[in-house]
Image: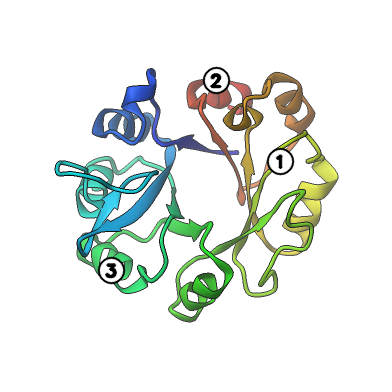
Amino acid sequence: MKILAHRGWWETAAEKNSALAFRRAFESGLGVETDVRDQDGILRIAHDMPKGPGLMTFAEFLDIYKAYPQAGTIALNVKADGLQAAVRADLEAAGVTDLFCFDMAVPDSLIYLQKGFVTYTRHSEFEPVPPYYAEAHGVWLDAFRGDWITTEVVQAHLDAGKAVALVSPELHGRDYRPVWDSWAGLDHENLAICTDLPHLAAEHWR
């Protein structure tokens, strides 16, 4: 099970999507889920609409990532349309390839696929039929209102040749423990979990 630290490995809410949280995760060999938006033509690490100066650029984030050869995969939550060329330029400048994009609008996602990005579709109770499934490299598997994701659901995607990223229940304010116990037998090189508790997830699966 690969571990994706949700907005980095943060210990206080103020550390989310910060250099400290990213360094803590990468130093421990973990992957990271983070958010990208644009501000005045520059890509910024930001979950919400960027405002004011001083926000980390995507290029700066990639520089942090490159400083830790042991770091895991980057899951890039794309929060705005039309960023393909800018994301590609920063990735090529940094020489970073272990990254997938997800959460774009469907028309925008199709452009990411056309441009050769590793792109995940979404499967949730609100998206029972994941869009562009045949073309997608993987599935972002989410449960917003209840814990419906069984090992059978996960295995079906793996059997279809898709990588799977599980969204841990605490991201939606629910208890993670019974769900992690139900997923304990899952182990696959193409399987990841996105969590606010990456250190506990690493202990649970490793």
Badge 1 is on which residue?
143
Q: Residue at x 50, y 27 (%)?
A: 198
Q: Which of the pair 187/121 is nearer the observer?
A: 121
Disc assigned to residue 86: 3
The CA distance from mark 3 to mark 2 is 35 Å
Q: Residue type at mark 1?
A: Ala
Find numbered disc 3 in the image and state the secondary structure of the residue it sits on: helix
Q: Residue type at mark 2?
A: Leu
Find numbered disc 1 in the image and state the secondary structure of the residue it sits on: loop
The CA distance from mark 1 to mark 3 is 31 Å
Label located before the other in sequence (1 or 3):
3
Q: Is residue 30 above or below residue 24?
A: below
Position of 132 with respect to 157 (left or right) is left
Q: Residue at x 51, y 28 (%)?
A: 196
The location of residue 84, given as percent across then percent down, is 37, 71
Badge 2 is on which residue?
200
Q: Residue at x 60, y 38 (%)?
A: 1
Q: Quadrant of residue 9?
A: top left
